[in-house]
Image: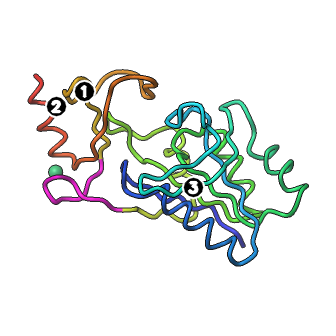
């Protein structure tokens, strides 16, 4: 029986690289992979139909808008050849409804979701929350904070200052992010106040 997986980690914890290596492994064995990412991720600036990892791996992907259905996309691509595996990168940006659709699809093909668990305010993203509720398997991709502890928060910096308010998704801003443990994140926030 196929399953719904959620492999989560902080920023720069190699999630996209792992998603792409996984795709490569399945394709080496002759399996068909549907690689998708939610459209809200504009990191690629005009090259939206690519998944890119920080270590240089890239692959073409389908994108899906918040009002589009994973089931419709699956049916369309599946008609051209049966899909064995669905891989979703940046899965935190999916809507709760889209995660419900992925749960349905996991009866037909394994669905591997990669994404962030927590946003820059240390709360679950909508898609991540639904994945925690529905996934058959949760796996943490660990990464290290500057202090050596495990990182968990994706701290947002605007003009060099750590902030915990603002829009969930900031597009085109001059912000940057650092994955941190909860305690270093609290220290960084308090330095600003
Ligand atoms: Zn720390």
> In this image, 142 relative to 172: left or right?
left
Circle nearer the N terminus (1, 2): 1
Numbered mark located on residue 19 in the image: none
The magenta stretch is: 142-152
Task: Tell me which corner region of the image, top left, top right, bottom left or bottom right, holds residue 164.
Answer: top left
Residue at mark 1: 163
> Which of the numbered marks, if any, corresponds to residue 189?
2
Task: Name the residue at the right extreme.
Answer: 79
Q: Residue at x 68, y 65 (%)?
A: 110
Left or right of 23: which side holds 122? left
- The residue that label 3 is drawn on is 113
Locate residue 119, reporting x and y percent: 38, 38
Local packing at callout 3 (Cα closer than 10 Å; few below 14, some 14-19, many 20+) is many
Tell me: 12 left or right of 67.
left
State if disc 2 and disc 1 touch (CB < 8 Å).
Answer: yes
Q: Secondary structure at mark 3?
A: strand
The quadrant of the image that shows the N terminus is bottom right
Question: What's the magenta bit mostly, secondary-structure-wise?
Answer: loop
Q: Position of residue 160 (x, y in %)?
A: 20, 28
Left/right of residue 54 with respect to residue 88 in the rendered view? left
């Amino acid at each position: 029986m196929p399953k719904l997986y959620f492999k989560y980690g902080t920023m720069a914890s190699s999630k996209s690289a792992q998603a792409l290596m996984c795709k490569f492994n399945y394709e080496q064995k002759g399996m068909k992979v549907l690689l998708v990412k939610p459209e809200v991720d504009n990191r690629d600036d005009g090259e939206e139909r690519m998944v890119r990892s920080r270590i240089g791996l890239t692959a073409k992907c389908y994108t899906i808008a918040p009002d589009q259905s994973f089931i419709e996309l699956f049916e369309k691509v599946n008609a051209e050849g049966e899909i064995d595996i669905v891989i979703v990168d940046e899965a935190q940006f999916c809507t709760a409804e889209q995660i419900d659709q992925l749960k349905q699809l996991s009866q037909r093909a394994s669905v591997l979701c990669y994404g962030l668990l927590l946003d820059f305010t240390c709360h679950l993203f909508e898609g991540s929350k639904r994945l925690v509720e529905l996934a058959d398997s949760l796996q943490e991709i660990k990464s290290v904070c500057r202090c050596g502890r495990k990182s968990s928060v994706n701290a947002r910096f605007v003009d060099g200052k750590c902030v915990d308010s603002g829009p969930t998704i900031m597009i085109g801003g001059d912000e940057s992010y650092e994955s941190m443990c909860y305690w270093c994140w609290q220290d960084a926030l308090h330095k600003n106040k």
